[in-house]
Image (cartoon, rainbow, N blue to C red):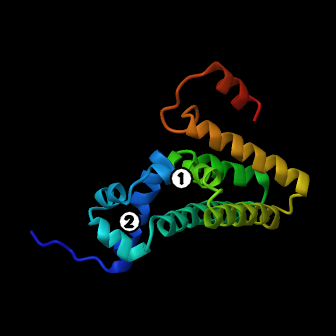
Amino acid sequence: MTRTRLTAAERGEEVLEAAIVAFGESGYAGTKTDEIARLAGVSQPYVIRLFGTKQQLFLATLERVCDQVEQAFRTAAEKQADLETLGDAFNQLLERRELLVVLLHGFAASAEPAIGKASRDRFGRIYRTVRDLTGATPEEAREFMATGMLLTVMAAMQVVGPNPVACTWATDLLETL
């Protein structure tokens, strides 16, 4: 059996996907680069060679997740540039719980200056993207972002998304959205 040799860029993509899973499960502080390497099928020194430090890998992971959120919104806006259509796109992201949980871990790790700056910058960029794509007022965009954050927290608690845990309060909240 012949094994296909991947380029460093292709391996980097695999490491980023593994990092989304690992950081989504254990957060920034709780994730070891050994675990990411194991998930990606590479050595831990190779992970460090690609990204430098765990913090740089987390920042690249956070960037990737935010890029995916923004791309989902841009793609949705090509069909119809309104908040409802962007909301539908966000609902699709709930299927990949780990993406949204990485965002929460980024916010929680914001005491680290580099992570805090990246989290604030990217959240602001998502906000501006929503406004630019839809023409939403600041109030409308605030409501959209607040709903998205509520859904993100609910995804982290596993009451929305794939195989949700049934909770009456969650059902009540979801029915009001």
Does dot 2 land on a helix, a strand or a loop?
Answer: helix
The mark found on residue 46 in the picture is none
The foreground one among 141 and 175 is 141
Q: Which residue is mark 2?
A: 15
For badge 1, the amino acid type reads: Leu
Does residue 160 sit above or below 171 in this rendering? Answer: below
The foreground one among 34 and 69 is 34
Quarter containing the C terminus:
top right
For badge 2, the amino acid type reads: Val
Q: Position of residue 85 (x, y in %)?
A: 72, 53
Residue drawn where x is 16% and y is 71% of the image = 3
The foreground one among 99 and 89 is 99
Q: Position of residue 16 (x, y in %)?
A: 43, 65
Residue drawn where x is 56% and y is 60% of the image = 65
The mark found on residue 99 in the picture is 1
Is the C-beta separation of discs 2 and 1 under 8 Å? no
56 on left or right of 43: right
Which quadrant of the structure image shows residue 78? bottom right
